[in-house]
């Protein structure tokens, strides 16, 4: 059997071990320390726009804290992009609030600004103004930032920008992760960089960062004993994991270049194939890190389906995966309202994510190419 080719697997640059070793040498084996501070300032520099970063144990934890900081509570409603990973929506439920899902638009596959506005108007008409909007840059592709921000501003609703898949992506030259009132990043094992598990909350002010760190470290009041006036969480990133992150930051741009080369590889491969579209930037305002390269397959033109491609790849021990199944089609969210048509649903039915790692070798590409060639 050939060795497995993954969709996206961790890709170490080499210096991660040195940062981790330093943590051991200095006995900073804790959810604080020089690597945590260093990783945060690396991220702040990388993102620009004077943002502040609180390093946390996961992107999910960052979303949860973002909702808490925006005052989302039981009985509230929060708007969320339907086509996304469940982690975007789950923290809404942790707060006892209800997600209201919004469809995608076909250009970026992300939240449709028109459906967003329709949802807001209808929820207000029904008696509840949504407390926040969670918009996602799916697969690294920036959402329609200007349009989404304009709607949010018009109705004065804060945006939580889920940039878990989009570190290094840009919209009009500015980094994803700087557009929301609060933004989140993820460093899970399959993301563009990894700390083996981790995330971050990105804030506009230092006070917001301090608030996030306070909540993430059990909400201890300023007293010599343990005193608490608020409910806290154990959501801080460890100094060991942050060391991996510091090493990963040194290779982030190089790895984005390689991910973008993978996208080019597929674009060239399918260039002549009528009925297969490689998901790509809809215009020069958009710069994707191409975390994952996805295709959509029009089987009435091709004569085969995305699922048939997936099964052929699987036979050769190559991982590929359907697109995120929209949240409004998930059994667990069957009672949540949904605004839109069938854009996300159609994408789910016809889409496929292909192996996109920055660590794929020429022999891997050869294997992928030889399986896909049967379909060309
Ligand atoms: C990975 C991911 C998250 C969650 O991040 P974790 O660090 O795995 O908790 C949230 N949203 C999206 C879109 C993601 O892809």
Image (spheres, rainbow, N blue to C red):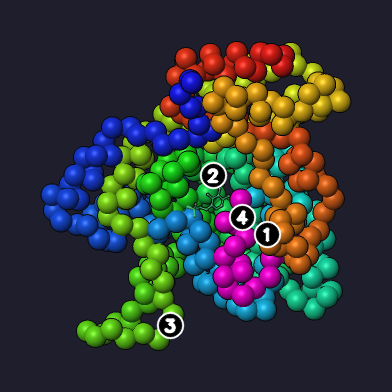
Q: What residue sits right under mark 4 in the picture?
A: 86
Local crowd size for mark 3, using a 10 Å CA cut-off: few (<14), some (14–19), many (≥20): few
| Residue furthest front in the image | 1
Marks 2/4: CA–CA distance: 13 Å
| Residue furthest left in the image | 25
User: Which numbered mark, 4 or 1, is in the foreground of this view?
Assistant: 4
Q: What residue sits right under mark 3 in the picture?
A: 230
Per the rendered image, the range of residues in magenta is 85-101
* Residue name at image x 69 percent, y 47 percent: 325
Task: Report the disc number at residue 80.
Answer: 1
Marks 3/1: CA–CA distance: 27 Å
Which comes sooner in the sequence, label 4 or label 1? 1
Q: Is residue 39 left or right of residue 342?
A: left
Q: Kindly indicate the quadrant of the structure image that contains residue 72.
A: bottom right
Which comes sooner in the sequence, label 2 or label 4? 4
Q: Is residue 285 left or right of residue 173?
A: right
Q: Is mark 2 within 8 Å of ligand 1?
A: yes
């Amino acid at each position: 059997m050939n060795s497995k080719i993954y969709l996206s697997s961790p890709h170490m640059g080499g210096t991660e071990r040195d940062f981790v070793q330093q943590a051991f040498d200095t006995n900073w084996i804790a959810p604080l320390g020089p690597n945590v501070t260093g990783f945060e300032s690396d991220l702040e520099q990388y993102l620009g726009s004077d943002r502040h970063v609180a390093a946390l144990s996961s992107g999910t934890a960052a979303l949860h804290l973002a909702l808490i900081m925006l005052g989302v509570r039981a009985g509230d409603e929060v708007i969320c992009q339907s086509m996304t990973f469940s982690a975007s929506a789950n923290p809404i439920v942790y707060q006892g609030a209800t997600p209201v899902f919004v469809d995608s638009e076909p250009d970026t596959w992300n939240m449709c600004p028109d459906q967003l506005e329709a949802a807001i108007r209808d929820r207000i008409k029904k008696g509840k103004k949504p407390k926040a909007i969670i918009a996602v840059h799916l697969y690294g592709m920036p959402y329609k930032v200007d349009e989404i921000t304009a709607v949010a501003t018009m109705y004065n609703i804060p945006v939580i920008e889920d940039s878990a898949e989009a570190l290094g992506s840009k919209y009009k030259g500015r980094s994803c992760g700087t557009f929301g009132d609060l933004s989140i990043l993820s460093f899970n094992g399959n993301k563009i960089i990894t700390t083996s598990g981790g995330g971050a909350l990105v804030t506009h002010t230092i006070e917001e960062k301090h608030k996030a760190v306070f909540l993430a470290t059990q909400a201890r009041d300023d007293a010599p004993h343990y005193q608490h006036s608020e409910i806290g969480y154990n959501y801080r990133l460890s100094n060991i994991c942050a060391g991996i992150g510091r090493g990963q930051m040194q290779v982030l741009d190089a790895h984005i270049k390689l991910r973008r080369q993978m996208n080019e590889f597929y674009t060239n491969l399918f260039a002549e194939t009528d009925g297969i579209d490689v998901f790509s930037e809809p215009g020069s305002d958009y710069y994707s890190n191409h975390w994952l390269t996805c295709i959509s397959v029009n089987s009435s033109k091709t004569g085969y389906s995305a699922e048939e491609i997936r099964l052929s790849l699987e036979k050769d021990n190559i991982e590929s995966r359907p697109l995120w199944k929209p949240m409004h089609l998930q059994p667990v969210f069957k009672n949540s309202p949904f605004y839109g048509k069938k854009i996300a649903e159609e994408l789910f039915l016809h889409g496929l994510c292909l192996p996109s790692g920055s660590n794929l070798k020429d022999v891997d590409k050869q294997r992928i190419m030889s399986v896909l060639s049967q379909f060309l």
